[in-house]
Amino acid sequence: MSKAKSDKVSPDLDTPTDLPPAAVDKISTALNTLLADAFALYLKTKNFHWHVSGRHFHDYHLMLDEQSEAIFATTDQLAERVRKLGGTTLRSIGQVAKLQTISDNDEDYVPPREMLRELMEDNKHIAASMRKAHKLCDEHEDSGTAGLLETFIDETERRTWFLFEASRQEGSNAA
């Protein structure tokens, strides 16, 4: 049995770990919030992919599809990292809704440039959250999670950069 015997973990799911229970709980909480945000950002990115219009439709449509796939690809790795540590992860859309810090966008119409800027800000927010989680991992000597987050931070910064460049007015950083 693991040292991280939490009330939240069924004995049938008690994964062995050398991390103290408090570390498992803190890191799992941070990762589950990142996971909820990944699902929220994935769906928002798909929403904008499905509803983008205008003269740059083709380019934006393809970019948003590529970005949504990259975001979705992080979800399994985040969830499995929680389980490797001995924690439990999300089980429902309801849990996603409770934990997400990324706002939904249910507007009937969003102009393309506003879509890109909103997604850029959301990606910046997630990168900042990942850095906070990385710091927590460093404090608890969890190099496995820290390494995973380093890769995801780089990927998130790449999405932010692409969204920024695609949303720029000619010769300006303004939206």
Image (cartoon, rainbow, N blue to C red):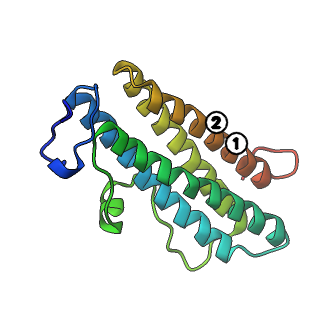
Residue kind at label 1, given as amino acid type: Arg
Q: Nearer the viewer, residue 106 or 34?
A: 34
Using the rendered image of the protein, determine whether residue 174 is visible from the camera's viewpoint: no
Image vertical order of residue 1 relative to residue 118, above or below: above
Q: Nearer the viewer, residue 79 or 3?
A: 3
Kindly state the secondary structure of the residue where label 1 is placed: helix
Image vertical order of residue 50 relative to residue 66, above or below: below
Q: Which residue is mark 2?
A: 154
User: x%, y% of residue 72?
Assistant: 56, 58
Kindly state the secondary structure of the residue where label 2 is placed: helix
Identity of the residue drawn at 46% across and 29% down: 144
Question: Residue 87 occupies which quadrant of the picture?
Answer: top left
Separation of marks 2 and 1 at Cα, in angstroms: 6 Å
Residue kind at label 2, given as amino acid type: Asp
Q: Residue furthest left?
A: 7
Identity of the residue drawn at 21% across and 29% down: 22
Q: Which residue is mark 1?
A: 158
